[in-house]
Image: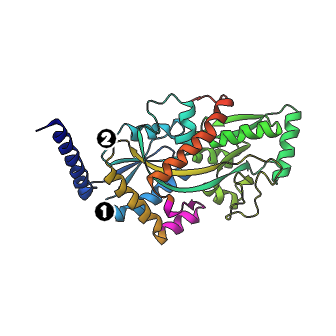
């Protein structure tokens, strides 16, 4: 057999092998790695998506929370896993944009991970403990300036170094001269606990996960970080409306597999995601917690890759200029 014929035969065999794997995949439970603690927005969304994908796939998806380093430890688990479709990971801005900019990772988020689908997004908003003197965004800004003039520090909880919450804090420092002492947490859930207990003054967390606490009066919401007001809390102004323009960031989520996972398996997973996100019960559950599902034409690997690349190009220069360093 000629070398060219041999190579062509290998290609044909690979195609048939991939198709055969897709026909039998999945034949056992799939593990979904989550880089943030139970009770937080990423874990909550992961469980909703996993439950919705179970029917289309015919196999359960087991959630495994692996916290630390702003979600990059869980992402590493996925990057180093066997590329067979049985290890996948949910990621967000922190784990797939912020962390790679500041942590010495042993994997590349673009070369070692295969995108599956964009899932959902929600705004972040600035929150304060319930005993904080200001009640509105404009009052908060004035209060922060007064404390700055008295050289008093305000504690500001973040979900790790290089997280969106830290970038918002840095942006407020630059915009109004606020003096913050940043307090890093391993996830949104413990940050919420300390905020509700009054252990920290402020934080900037995902709106969907914190709305119940705001409605219950456990802490105050001052402003959303999106360009428009959030429908779930229409009376909360944007930071731009409060007189601090240019401070906006969204908290988006996507699904990845190890690089080298057969395209047919990626397609199978993507189809299951689309089926889940089209299910009325799943959609209602996601929308109830305040998440916005991406349009169907963005629920695919190509769209996730393009979005991920655009976010990286936007934020990495800003993070480098701020000289943000990992402290975990």
Question: Is residue 116 part of the magenta span, yes or no?
Answer: no
Q: Is residue 186 visible?
A: no
Residue holding disc 1: 58
174 and 155: which is toward the camera = 174
In the rendered structure, find residue 283 and report the number of the disc placed on it: none
Q: Position of residue 112 (x, y in %)?
A: 41, 38
Q: Earlier in the sequence, mark 1 or mark 2?
A: 1
Q: Residue furthest bottom?
A: 280
Q: Position of residue 91 (x, y in %)?
A: 49, 46
Residue holding disc 2: 82
Q: Is residue 13 visible?
A: yes
Neighbours of disc 1 within 10 Å: few (<14), some (14-19), many (20+): some
| Secondary structure under the numbered disc 1 in the rendered image | loop
Q: Is residue 6 left or right of residue 112?
A: left
Q: Position of residue 117 (x, y in %)?
A: 46, 54
The magenta span reads 282-297
Q: Position of residue 80 (x, y in %)?
A: 37, 36
């Amino acid at each position: 057999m000629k070398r060219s014929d041999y190579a062509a035969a290998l290609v044909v065999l690979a195609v048939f092998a991939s198709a055969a794997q897709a026909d039998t995949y999945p034949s056992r439970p799939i593990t979904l790695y989550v880089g943030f603690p139970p009770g937080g927005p990423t874990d909550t969304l992961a469980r909703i998506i996993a439950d919705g994908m179970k029917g289309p796939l015919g196999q359960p998806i087991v959630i495994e929370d692996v916290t630390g380093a702003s979600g990059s430890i869980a992402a590493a688990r996925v990057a180093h896993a066997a590329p067979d479709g049985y290890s996948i990971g949910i990621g967000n801005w922190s784990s797939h944009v912020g962390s790679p900019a500041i942590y010495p990772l042993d994997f590349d988020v673009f070369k070692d991970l295969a995108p599956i689908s964009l899932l959902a997004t929600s705004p972040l908003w600035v929150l304060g403990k319930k005993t904080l003197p200001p009640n509105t965004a404009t009052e908060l800004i004035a209060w922060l300036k007064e404390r700055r003039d008295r050289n008093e520090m305000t504690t500001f909880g973040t979900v790790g170094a290089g997280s969106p919450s830290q970038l918002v804090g840095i942006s407020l420092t630059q915009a109004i001269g606020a003096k913050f002492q940043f307090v890093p947490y391993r996830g949104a859930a413990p940050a919420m606990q300390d905020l509700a207990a009054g252990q920290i003054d402020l934080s900037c967390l995902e709106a969907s996960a914190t709305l119940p606490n705001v409605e219950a009066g456990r802490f105050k919401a001052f402003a959303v970080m999106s360009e428009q007001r959030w429908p779930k809390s229409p009376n909360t102004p944007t930071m731009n409306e409060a007189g601090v323009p240019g401070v906006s960031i969204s908290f988006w989520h996507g699904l990845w597999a190890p690089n080298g996972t057969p395209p047919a398996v990626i397609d199978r997973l993507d189809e299951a995601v689309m089926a889940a996100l089209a299910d009325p019960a799943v959609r209602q559950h996601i929308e109830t917690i305040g998440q916005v599902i991406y349009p169907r034409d963005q629920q695919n690997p190509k769209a996730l890759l393009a979005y991920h690349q655009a976010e990286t190009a936007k934020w990495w220069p800003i993070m480098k200029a701020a000289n943000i360093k990992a402290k975990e």
